[in-house]
Image: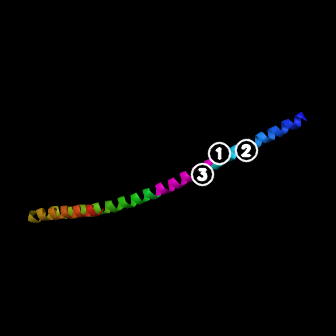
Amino acid sequence: MGENDEGIFMERRNDALVAKLSGKVAALKKITIAIGDDVREQNRLLNEMETDFDASKGLLGSTMRKLDRVAKAGGKHLTFSTELFSTKMMSSLDTC
């Protein structure tokens, strides 16, 4: 009887350890899924930022080309054009 009792005790102990381990695995799975969701969201936000930066780069390049033409025109138009440019830039920044 002693060996049988010991076997039952060991089996119950193993069952308890398996249950405990199963709980830890389930918790780890939830954490892993949450991390994966977070990484996907961060990647989406980074892609949006990249698109926004590309658009800003294009706008800035266009603005610099226009400003270069204004500077080359010189004379009285330069002052007026610079003021117009500044006003337009400020209004476009307000819309961003």
Q: Nearer the viewer, residue 6 or 52?
A: 6
What whole-number distance in Å separates the C-alpha atoms at marks 2 and 3? Answer: 18 Å
Magenta-colored span: 27-43
* Residue visible at 86% across and 37% down in the picture: 5
Q: Which circle marks residue 24 in the picture? A: 1
* Residue visible at 21% across and 64% down in the picture: 88
Q: How crowded is mark 2: few (under 14 residues within 10 Å), some or many (20 or more)?
A: few
**Mark 2 highlights which residue?**
18
Q: Please name the amino acid that badge 1 sits on.
A: Lys
**Mark 3 highlights which residue?**
30
Q: Nearer the viewer, residue 77 or 28?
A: 28
Say above or below: 66 vs 10: below
Q: Please indicate, yes or no, whether residue 70 appears anywhere in the rendered image.
A: yes
Which is the main secondary structure of the residues drawn in magenta? helix
Q: Which circle marks residue 70 in the picture? A: none
* Residue visible at 39% across and 61% down in the picture: 51
Quick one: SS at disc 1?
helix
Residue 43: % across, % down: 47, 56
